[in-house]
Image: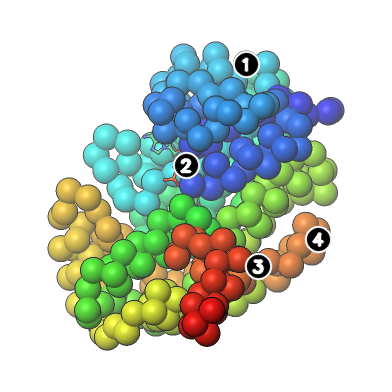
Amino acid sequence: MQIRKVVVLGGSGFVGGYVVAKLDAAGYQVKVLTRRRESAKHLILLPNVEVVECNVMQDAGLDQELTGSDAVINLVGILHNNKTFGFERIHHQLPRRVAQLCAELGIPRLIQMSALQASASAPSAYLRSKAAGEAAVLEYAKKLDITIFRPSVIFGRGDSFINLFAQLIKLLPVVMLAKPDAKFQPIWVEDVAICFVSSLQNIATYSKVYELGGPKVYSLRQLVQAVADELGKKRIIVGLNDSLSMMQGFALGLMPIKLMTTDNIKSMQVDNVCKQEFPTFFNLTPTALETIMPEYLNNQVPRAAYDKFRGVAGR
Ligand SMILES: NC(=O)c1ccc[n+]([C@@H]2O[C@H](COP(=O)([O-])OP(=O)(O)OC[C@H]3O[C@@H](n4cnc5c(N)ncnc54)[C@H](OP(=O)(O)O)[C@@H]3O)[C@@H](O)[C@H]2O)c1
């Protein structure tokens, strides 16, 4: 079946913006569901994109908005648990409901966003809930063509991971770093978006779970150092041991705006590194962090580097 109409849940978010732009460029008719139209205003001008206000956690609205589409991409996710819409509802019940509705409404194609190291036995509630979401969706594998993506941490303009450390480095002379030896394999958001869009109509990707990681593995300390170097800031990075890391997570988790929680620290107990090679299917060589980070961390376009060199050379 030819896919034309795609509904994206979570399309207003960081990853969603890139996925939606690529879908639009590929000529799909895209509907983005968001709780607040304002959060997706950057997508409204895209010619093939319709932004619809809909609380996807409420059945009636979701049912109505999915009706008539050919495919659904579910990117809805949270990093910190909360009492109203916590991991269980967002990462487990919502994907289940989406898959169920796809089956009921005759929508054949579903792409579900998970996370690297999602597992029922993972140390963090975040990763366990992502695994529960995968399992819930896969219960419909006989009725739907499902693809699941499990990326490591995703970087790019607008990310919250690299930008969070950039903010801390700008503010603090000394960075007290939890889990400094935790490993990550950061992947560029554009590469993730390419994988989503190119898999949409390719049956070779149906019923597959793909791990997505970039070309290099870094410890958290190396990542933070790379950010500091890029910003030209000399900072002392003090690595915390496991108990102090948990204490920091606990203290920061009490703040109204959460930078880190104990659950995030627990996620870092398992290395966020792919077991598989980057899937050759996508015909893509993942882009290195060092190539992209300067462009957005210093709000630079590549040509701006020449201006820097000219400045240094006094020209
Ligand atoms: N960023 C990463 O490094 C990374 C790594 C691995 C996996 N992932 C996964 O990738 C997905 C997208 O991540 P992201 O970084 O783009 O996240 P994001 O920028 O925080 O966007 C999250 C999206 O989820 C929606 N959402 C959040 N809470 C909701 C709620 N209670 N009800 C309805 N919608 C809600 C938001 O939609 P509204 O417009 O309604 O606010 C928003 O579009 C998530 O599933 C995440 O777990 C991300």
Q: How far, Cα to Cα, is label 4 from label 1?
A: 33 Å
Q: How far, Cα to Cα, is label 4 from label 3?
A: 13 Å
The quarter of the image that holds ligand 1 is: top left
The answer, for residue 288, to whether it is visible in the render is yes
Q: Nearer the viewer, mark 4 or mark 1?
A: 4
Is disc 3 surrounded by few (<14), some (14 to 19) or many (20+) residues within 10 Å?
Answer: some
Q: Amino acid at mark 2?
A: Gly
**Considering the numbered disc 3 on the image, is that residue within a helix, a strand or a loop?**
loop
Q: Amino acid at mark 4?
A: Asn
Left/right placement of residue 119 relative to residue 18 reads left
- Mark 2 lies on residue: 13
The verdict on label 2 being within 8 Å of ligand 1 is yes
Q: Amino acid at mark 1?
A: Thr
Query: Up-down: is 83 above or below 57?
Result: below
Q: Could you tell me which residue is drawn at 45 percent across and 65 percent down?
A: 298
Q: Nearer the viewer, mark 3 or mark 1?
A: 3
Q: How far, Cα to Cα, is label 2 from label 3?
A: 21 Å
Q: How far, Cα to Cα, is label 3 from label 1?
A: 37 Å
Q: Nearer the viewer, residue 289 or 81?
A: 289
